[in-house]
Image (spheres, coloured by chain):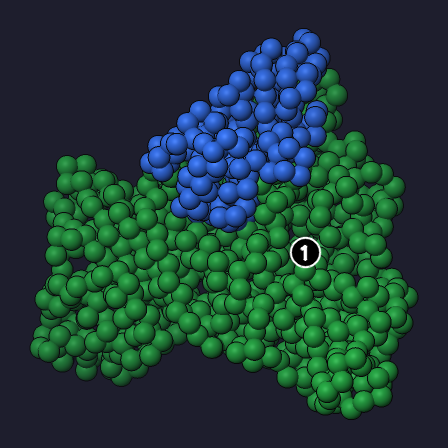
Chain colours: A blue, B green
């Protein structure tokens, strides 16, 4: 057991936990943040993607020790109140989801890519999101949404 | 957070906005004590079910004949529709309210929807087979139309004018000549219980009068799904709930011999359950439960199966039951006499996993002799029946609640994880969460069937198909019967996803998005292409020449135009493919363009087109999503997806070896839905059906090699190029 201090969705957070536990199950079981999904448990599907210090990370293979002193953003931390982030807005508008289970992870993955490079090309986004699986087959819409969100973020929205 | 209708005595995390937590108690409402218009009419609209029976899909239950089970209007004019269907991404949560709003005459925003809750919603057979819009849609439309007729009758009495002089305008009944005479639906209901019998059937609106159906409103699940608020079964956490992990055999057919749980019992806070073949460890923390399971020591007697993904086809051919002949005509012997060129080919396809992103999940709570299950299921009522039977409970003692389902594709039709959660909740007295690991998901999946399909056919001197002798083993009847003009033909179906001899398939199989159709379309459309190439005729024109169905011809011609298909006999080197199918009432043509890397055999799909005629479309954008999704998913079974297994063990346990379509391989996708006034048809399945065939045909067109086994892995493409 160890006391881990980190920033979670903008809020300073302290948890005393077994530091080898994964961020995924601490978020889901201890903190009730169920937007981060379990899909494969081996960083193969991207459903559990969160952003740690601007990097997309698979929460299912990220230990609590790994996030000590860092800033973690989950899907719950992306919107500002009722105001959706441009990536969320674009996913909703382009119907870039069906069952929605992979969607939080994809949005966090896209958010990480576009925050660094809002002008990323469709091909670049596609290759950066290749670690995400969507079984419903919303890929073309996800890319449409990302290109549009990137343009909005380039225009200063974040 | 919204609370369930009956407070179970503790704060429960339930799907926000899911709707089952309403301001009134639905059961009281059904008994007639709550506010709102109660329309008691005997529902004569069982036509939908008769139509289903014709397709061999007679459900084991009944839709209520009382329309108030489906539609409720409160004093404020708010409309709630109750449906037993579930939302797994296909979009009916958005399209059903469109149907109700249209027929009732209220704005779309006035209609809310409650789904998949056995305490609140009317019985339903399950969400599968592209049946929701096709067969349940008309039920819901009739319910709304009857409600509208009753409201007009009530208004006529209140306003003292003949019914014929009244019309409905956005939730209000208005006098045609004197619009000051008006009364809202809410004013009419006044919270009274009203029973009415209508003489005659109210007419449904003509499709030309639609203002809501045929538009694409925003999806109702959009905001919840992009913010992470959407709840799935595994997100439901009753207080005190325990995660359960179960001991699993290493192979199908392996039998537990010895088990030692002493190490697992040392994990602080763990509960160990051992009863017969059930060995489970439970803990509030998922990870502690995982750890405890890892230290359970068990030995198993090995499975007897010697089947593998390589020898399976030989086995299926040997073990196949005698079979049925769903279609035949003319005389095969006569056809063979007429043939100047004959063809005999065998096509195979491996087992394919559903691999929904949400693994099977269920949460069970057993309190005050009532079992409540939140389940990722496509079949809440069949699951309820199964729970009642297994645990000897009455109908009032079981409630199945279906939050958002994270993908189904037919794979969430069985109830195993729910039975496990229920059994453990009843044994431990605690709410229990069962969320399968990905390995469990692959192990217990009800796979899409492997298939062996033999086709013998012949052409006469003028390149007409004169006979067609088709035998499908393993995949079943759906899509087996061809739709071409062939004078002498026979279709034989041996085995499928049900009613098989024991041990025919080495593990559970079940419906997988248009079950059997994918294999059947692959064989049929490949064979058509084989003959077109030998005849030296363009494959699109060869099909047109053998089609008489006007819908099929229209779709194929529209596809050729949209794609920019210029006729050329294959192999043209262009890498163009075409394949047709008829599934779930829709007719579909897919076209593809691809490249083949000749040194590696790797296929690079450049673009895909799907043209579909599916009757009236409720939400065009929603239908497009289904078509695109079907085509994208279909890239998997066509190119890479195949379950590897040996001696009862499933060797693929995660996405490292089992390859689903990813962003890198998804091409440009174009869809075109042809306008139609016909009844709404299925939309969830048809577009995936021709995917194996269209890509196999395009591979042939690109490099002249015919691949007769799915998936078309680079090795198989290379082997076909050498042959």
* SS type, badge 1: loop
Query: Does B607 sit above or below residue B673?
Result: above
Residue occupying the point 48% across, 21% down: A55
Image quarter (top left, top right, bottom left or bottom right) of the N terminus of chain A: top right
Identify the image quadrant of residue B479: bottom left
Residue occupying the point 14% across, 41% down: B598
User: Which residue has dot 1 on it?
Assistant: B116
Residue B712 screen position, x and y as percent: 27, 46
**For this view, does A57 lie left or right of residue B664?**
right
Of B391 and B227, nearer the camera is: B227
Q: Tag 1: Cα neighbours inside 10 Å, few (<14), some, or many (≥20)?
A: many
Residue B80 screen position, x and y as percent: 73, 62
Query: Does B48 sit above or below residue B513?
Result: below
Residue occupying the point 37% across, 62% down: B672
Count of numbered circles in the view: 1
Q: Is residue A10 visible?
A: yes
Identify the image quadrant of residue B395: bottom right
Residue B558 screen position, x and y as percent: 30, 69
Residue B494 screen position, x and y as percent: 38, 64
**For this view, does B146 lie left or right of residue B223?**
right
Residue occupying the point 60% across, 73% down: B138
Q: Is residue B649 visible?
A: no
Of B177 and B105, nearer the camera is: B177
Identify the image quadrant of residue B177: bottom right
Image quarter (top left, top right, bottom left or bottom right) of the C terminus of chain A: top right
Query: Does B329 sit above or below residue B443?
Result: below
């Amino acid at each position: 057991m160890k006391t881990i201090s980190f920033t979670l969705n903008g809020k300073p957070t302290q948890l005393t936990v077994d530091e080898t536990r994964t961020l995924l199950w601490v978020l889901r079981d201890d903190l009730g943040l169920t937007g981060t999904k379990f899909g494969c448990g081996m960083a193969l599907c991207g459903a559990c993607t969160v952003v740690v210090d601007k990097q997309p990370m698979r929460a299912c293979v990220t230990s609590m020790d790994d996030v000590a002193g860092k800033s973690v953003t989950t899907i719950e931390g992306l919107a500002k109140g009722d105001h959706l982030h441009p990536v969320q807005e674009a996913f909703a508008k382009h119907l870039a989801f069906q069952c929605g289970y992979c969607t939080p992870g994809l949005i966090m993955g896209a958010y990480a890519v576009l925050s660094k490079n809002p002008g990323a090309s469709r091909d670049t986004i596609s290759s950066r999101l290749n670690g995400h699986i969507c079984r419903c087959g919303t890929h073309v819409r996800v890319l449409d949404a990302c290109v549009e969100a990137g343009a909005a973020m380039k225009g200063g929205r974040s | 957070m919204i609370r369930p209708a009956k407070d179970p005595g503790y704060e429960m995390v339930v799907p926000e906005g899911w709707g089952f937590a309403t301001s009134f108690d639905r059961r009281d409402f059904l008994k007639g004590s709550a506010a709102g218009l109660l329309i008691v009419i005997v529902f004569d609209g069982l036509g939908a079910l008769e139509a289903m029976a014709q397709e061999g899909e007679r459900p084991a239950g009944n839709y209520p004949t009382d329309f108030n089970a489906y539609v409720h209007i409160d004093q404020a004019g708010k409309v709630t529709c109750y449906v037993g269907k579930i939302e797994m991404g296909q979009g009916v949560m958005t399209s059903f309210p469109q149907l109700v709003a249209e027929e009732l005459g209220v704005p779309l925003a006035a209609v809310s929807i409650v789904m998949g809750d056995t305490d609140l919603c009317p019985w339903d057979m399950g969400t599968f087979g592209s049946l929701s819009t096709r067969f349940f849609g008309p039920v819901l439309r009739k319910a709304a139309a009857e409600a509208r007729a009753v409201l007009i009758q009530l208004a006529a009495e209140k306003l003292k004018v003949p019914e014929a002089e009244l019309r409905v305008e956005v939730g209000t009944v208005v006098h045609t000549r004197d619009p000051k005479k008006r009364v809202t639906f809410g004013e009419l209901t006044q919270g009274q219980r009203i029973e009415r019998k209508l003489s005659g059937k109210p007419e449904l609106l003509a499709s030309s009068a639609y203002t809501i159906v045929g538009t694409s409103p925003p999806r109702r699940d959009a905001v919840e799904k992009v913010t992470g608020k959407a709840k799935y079964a595994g997100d439901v956490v009753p207080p005190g709930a325990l995660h359960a992990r179960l001991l699993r055999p290493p192979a199908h057919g392996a039998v537990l011999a010895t088990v030692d749980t002493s190490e697992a019992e040392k994990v602080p806070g763990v509960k160990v359950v051992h009863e017969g073949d059930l060995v489970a460890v439970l803990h509030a923390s998922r990870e502690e439960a995982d750890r405890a399971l890892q230290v359970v020591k068990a030995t198993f007697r090995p499975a007897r199966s010697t089947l593998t993904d390589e020898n399976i086809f030989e086995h299926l051919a040997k073990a196949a039951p005698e079979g049925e002949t769903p279609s035949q005509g003319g005389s095969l012997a006569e056809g063979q006499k007429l043939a100047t060129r004959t063809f005999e080919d065998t096509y195979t396809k491996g087992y394919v996993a559903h691999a929904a992103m949400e693994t099977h999940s269920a949460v069970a709570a057993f309190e005050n002799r009532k079992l409540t299950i939140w389940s990722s299921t496509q079949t809440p009522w069949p699951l309820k029946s199964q729970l009642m039977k297994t645990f000897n409970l009455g109908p009032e003692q079981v409630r199945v609640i279906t939050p958002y389902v994270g993908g189904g594709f037919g794979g969430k039709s069985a109830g195993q994880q729910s039975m496990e959660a229920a059994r453990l909740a009843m044994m431990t007295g605690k709410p229990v969460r069962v969320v399968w690991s990905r390995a469990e998901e692959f192990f217990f999946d009800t796979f899409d069937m492997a298939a062996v399909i033999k086709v013998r056919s012949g052409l006469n001197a003028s390149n007409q198909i004169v006979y067609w002798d088709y035998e499908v083993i393993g995949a079943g009847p759906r899509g087996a019967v061809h739709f071409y003009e062939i004078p002498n033909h026979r279709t034989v179906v041996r085995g499928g996803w049900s009613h098989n001899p024991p041990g025919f398939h080495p593990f559970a199989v079940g419906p997988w998005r248009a079950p059997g159709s994918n294999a059947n379309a692959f064989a049929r459309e490949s064979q058509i292409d084989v003959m077109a190439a030998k005849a030296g005729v363009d494959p699109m024109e060869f099909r047109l020449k053998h089609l008489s169905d006007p819908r099929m011809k229209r779709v194929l011609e529209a596809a050729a135009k949209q794609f920019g298909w210029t006729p050329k006999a294959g192999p043209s080197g262009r890498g163009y493919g075409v394949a047709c199918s008829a599934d779930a009432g829709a007719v579909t043509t897919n076209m593809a363009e691809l490249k083949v890397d000749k040194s590696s055999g790797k296929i690079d799909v450049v673009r895909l087109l799907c043209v579909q005629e599916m009757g009236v479309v409720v939400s065009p954008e929603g239908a497009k999503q289904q078509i695109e999704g079907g085509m994208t998913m279909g890239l998997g079974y066509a190119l890479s997806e195949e379950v590897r297994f040996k001696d009862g063990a499933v060797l693929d346990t995660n996405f490292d070896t089992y390859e689903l379509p990813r962003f890198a391989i998804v091409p440009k996708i174009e869809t075109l839905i042809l306008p139609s006034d016909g009844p709404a048809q299925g939309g969830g399945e048809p577009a995936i059906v021709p995917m194996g065939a269209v890509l196999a045909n395009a591979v042939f067109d690109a490099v002249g090699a015919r691949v007769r086994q799915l998936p078309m892995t680079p090795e198989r493409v290379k082997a076909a190029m050498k042959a």
